[in-house]
Image (spheres, rainbow, N blue to C red):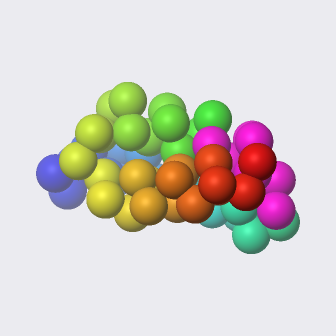
Amino acid sequence: MRDRKLATLTRFTEALSLYDRQKFRESVELFGECLSQNPGDRMARIYCDRAQGNI
């Protein structure tokens, strides 16, 4: 799990930055990429769901 999270860290950080700037559509795309590589990433799932709720 740790290696998979590290592999998506840059993408997750960018998605989180977009989320904070209320660019929800763009953040959903990046969180989705994180989840496709690491389906067990709980934080990516939470933020992806929250962003989708704001679209």
- Does the magenta-highlighted stretch encompass residue 1? no
Residue located at (64% from left, 55% from top) = 53
Residue located at (31% from left, 59% from top) = 42
Q: Compared with residue 34, is residue 43 higher up or lower down, i.e. above or below?
A: below
Whole-percent x, y for residue 6 in the image: 34, 52
Judge whether residue 4 can be spotted in this image: yes
Pick the front one: 7 or 27: 27
Number of marks present in the image shown: 0
37 on left or right of 8: left
What are the residue bounds of the magenta stretch?
22-28
Q: Residue furthest front?
A: 53
18 on left or right of 8: right
Judge whether residue 10 can be spotted in this image: no
Quarter residue 16 falls in:
bottom right
Whole-percent x, y for residue 36 in the image: 38, 30
Magenta region, main secondary structure: helix
38 on left or right of 32: left
